Image (tube, helix red, strand yellow):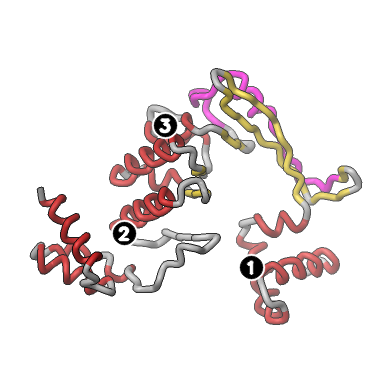
Amino acid sequence: TELGKLYEVIEQGVTENLFNTNLEFISYLDSHFKGIKSYFSRIKKHLTDEIFDEDSNVICCDLKGWDENIKGPVLLFLFQWFQSLGQKAVFLLDELTKYIEKPEHATSIANYFRQVRKEGGSAWAIFQYLDDAANKESYPLLYVIFDGAETKFIFPQEFEDSVKLDQISKAMLKSLREDSSILEIDNDKSRDHSEFLILKKNQNSIIRKIARLNRTNLLFEKYNTDSTEREVFEKWEEAQGKYFPNFKERLLKYVEVKYASSIN
């Protein structure tokens, strides 16, 4: 078949070192499959010959703004790379709903999460709304991922009664609350706190637990995504960041200064 021949041609090129850059790779393929280079025309601007450091502790790939034609291949590459690491890494896919809506991505992603779970790997799917994840009718593949997850962390939110959760879990989720006041717990003042629900599969039963996240000023600044708060930090970093060698030290100093002098 053509697919089998394509595999053989690529394997020969890699084995005999017949190309060293992406453009050389495309030209090499086109010499065997005339016209195949046109397939790459819309993604050429995204290609780079930068060496991928497989030993990096953190690999971050931001697909925002990328052409839809490149997102699928990149996701497949990341899946395959992660699987090659076995159980040595954790894979996180944020804003999962954006990808699962697209048929060309959805099946591959759903199959990947199933495979990782069978092999004992650790893959995390992150999404905003329970109504999407637990809606079997509207997002069947997303529901497969949600339902098959060994552990779920669900934060306070409104949701439709039609979501696929048992009644006990629904009641516990509705009881969650957020408090924006300053609390003092064990003599440790926190900026605010948030409760969330943990659901964990245990053979034929479900373990349910309500947990509380007490957020200190440092945690608030580290994980907050509010644009106004971010702009305040960026202005301070532009003016003062040069005096600190790395992001960790800049953030620690920023928190110290901000809450000592209320620079915001």
Quarter assignment of residue 157: top right
Q: Secondary structure at mark 3?
A: helix
Name the residue tied to disc 2: 70
- The numbered mark at residue 144 is 3
Could you classify mark 1 by the number of other residues whose Cα lies within 10 Å: few (under 14), some (14-19), or many (20 or more)? few
- The numbered mark at residue 178 is none
- Kindly indicate whether the residue at mark 1 contacts the one at mark 3 (C-beta within 8 angstroms): no
Quick one: label 3 or label 1, which is nearer the N terminus? 3
Quarter of the image where the C terminus is located: bottom right
Could you classify mark 2 by the number of other residues whose Cα lies within 10 Å: few (under 14), some (14-19), or many (20 or more)? some
Q: Secondary structure at mark 2?
A: helix
Residue 135 drawn above or below residue 86 = above
Magenta residues, start to end: 159-183
Q: Which residue is located at x 75 percent, y 69 percent?
A: 254
Residue 264 in sight in this render: no
Under mark 1, the amino acid is Glu
Question: Spatial distance from mark 3 to mark 2, Cα to Cα?
Answer: 25 Å
Q: Nearer the viewer, mark 3 or mark 1?
A: 3
Quick one: label 1 or label 2, which is nearer the N terminus? 2
Q: Which residue is located at x 49 percent, y 38 percent?
A: 120
Could you classify mark 3 by the number of other residues whose Cα lies within 10 Å: few (under 14), some (14-19), or many (20 or more)? some
Quick one: label 3 or label 2, which is nearer the N terminus? 2
Q: Which residue is located at x 60 percent, y 36 percent?
A: 154
Under mark 2, the amino acid is Ile
In percent of width and height, residue 227 lies at 61, 61
Quarter assignment of residue 186: top right
Q: Residue 173 colored magenta?
A: yes
In percent of width and height, residue 130 lies at 52, 35
- Kindly indicate whether the residue at mark 2 contacts the one at mark 3 (C-beta within 8 angstroms): no
Name the residue tied to disc 1: 231
Residue 68 placement, left or right of 34: right
Residue 182 placement, left or right of 98: right
